[in-house]
Amino acid sequence: MSMATSMKANVSSLSGMETGRIKIEDDIITKTHKFFLLRGLRLDDGLMRRLAKGSNDRLKNGNPLFKR
């Protein structure tokens, strides 16, 4: 909730991105990176973008985690 508030994002949208149901946009990656930096956590921006791309590719190709 605090992350969503800080980023001015919808909690359910962040949850959907976290679980691979919603595409992760570049601006969310930037905001997430900044959110953690402000809290003293240095994350690899490039790695975050590669992981988001992988998630987005799985979503585009049909995420097997949500198939029945």
Image (cartoon, helix red, strand yellow):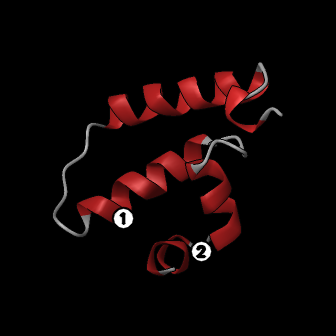
Indicate the amino acid at tag 1. Answer: Phe
1 left or right of 37 in image: right
Residue 33 at what x, y percent from top left?
Answer: 36, 52
32 left or right of 57 in image: left
Q: Which mark, by number, is residue 8?
A: 2
Sequence-wise first label, 1 or 2: 2
Neighbour tally class for label 2: few under 14, some 14-19, many 20 plus, Cα within 10 Å: few
Judge by depth and name the residue closer to the eye, 35 or 12: 12
Q: Marks 1 and 2, Cα distance to the nearest angstrom? A: 11 Å
Indicate the amino acid at tag 2. Answer: Lys
Residue 53 seen by the camera:
yes
What's the residue at 72%, 45% (across, down)? 21
Residue 15 at what x, y percent from top left?
Answer: 61, 60
Residue 10 seen by the camera:
no
52 left or right of 67 in image: left
Neighbour tally class for label 1: few under 14, some 14-19, many 20 plus, Cα within 10 Å: some
Circle 1 sits in a helix, a strand or a loop, which is it?
A: helix
Compared to residue 11, the image places residue 54 above or below, namely: above
Judge by depth and name the residue closer to the eye, 25 or 16: 16
Residue 17 at what x, y percent from top left?
Answer: 62, 49
Give residue 32's quadrant in the image: bottom left
Residue 26 at what x, y percent from top left?
Answer: 57, 41
Give residue 68's quadrant in the image: top right
Q: Which mark, by number, is residue 66?
A: none
Compared to residue 25, the image places residue 10 above or below, namely: below
Task: Provide the residue designation for mark 1.
Answer: 35
Compared to residue 35, the image places residue 25 above or below, namely: above
